[in-house]
Amino acid sequence: MAKIILASSSPRRKILLEALGLNPMVIAPSSISEQVSGDPRFVVMYNASMKALSVYKRFLREEDIIVIGADTVIELNNRVLGKPKNIDDARWMLHHLSGRFHRVLTGLAVISNVGGVNRRFIELGEALVKIKQLEDDEIEWYIRTGEPLEAAGAYMLQGLGGIFVEEVKGDPYTVVGLPLSKLYVILRRIGVRLPDNPPGRGGLLWLKK
């Protein structure tokens, strides 16, 4: 099997790939200037591509490698919400997400050199998420857990923040940060087949960190 390289330090993305039996090497991208403004769809696809390319350049002399990059943001009223800068920023995000639908966008970029053939893929995952109406004490409790500072939009669907999610329209793994259905199609096109007995058989453990 080709060497799978995850161009991200996100533990959640690594867990999802491991659940599929892919056992990725994790190499965080370096020296990239992430896009933070403009059309949110362009932002996530551009950032995912730059992350994947940054890592792929380190393996130009190698064959049978697949580099996966991803970027996730929340779009609310045409505004891009990334990870909170601080507690006050997290509090502001949660107050504005409370009781409303918002859009989650994840850009997925895959660059491969398998069998001497170079390929590049870019996909966009989208989902709508509704957060319940949050009371002030719920927001303060959630902030004290520390989780809001670790995720775009100040919540994690697969973590404690999942208790506040009332509805998801679309791919839930886009919300987690890695649209698995789109990645699966790409891997098949490259020629990668999943093992017969992957660790995630029977259901992925979303709460695991």
Image (cartoon, helix red, strand yellow):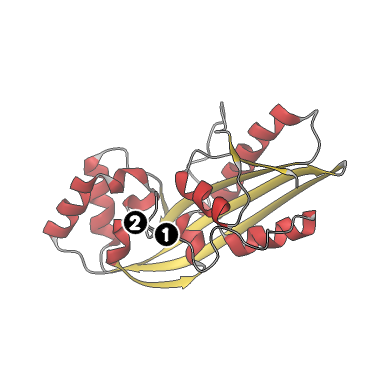
Circle 2/circle 1 CB separation < 8 Å: yes
Identify the element where label 2 is drawn: loop
> Residue 1 vs residue 75: left or right?
right
Say few, some or many: other residues with alpha carbon within 10 Å of mark 2 (under 14 / 14 to 19 / 20 or more).
some
Whether 168 is drawn above or below 31: the answer is: below
Whether 108 is drawn above or below 196: the answer is: above
Q: Which residue occupies the extreme left position in the image? A: 137
* Residue type at the position of mark 2: Gly
Residue at image point 29% right, 57% down? 160
Residue at image point 18% right, 46% down? 144
Cα distance in 3D space between marks 2 and 1: 7 Å
> Residue 182 vs residue 193: left or right?
left
Find residue 5 and report its image quarter. Answer: top right
Given residues 97 and 176, the one toward you in this image is 176
| Mark number, residue 159 | 2
Residue at image point 59% right, 45% down? 48
| Mark number, residue 206 | 1
Q: Position of residue 119 (x, y in %)?
A: 79, 47
Find residue 179 and report its image quarter. Answer: bottom right
Say few, some or many: other residues with alpha carbon within 10 Å of mark 1 (under 14 / 14 to 19 / 20 or more).
some
> Residue 120 vs residue 144: left or right?
right
Residue at image point 69% right, 27% down? 58
Q: Position of residue 113 (x, y in %)?
A: 80, 41
Identify the element where label 1 is drawn: loop
Whether 59 is drawn above or below 24: the answer is: above
- Which of the two discs, 2 and 1, labels the residue nearer the N terminus? 2
Q: Position of residue 142 (x, y in %)?
A: 21, 53
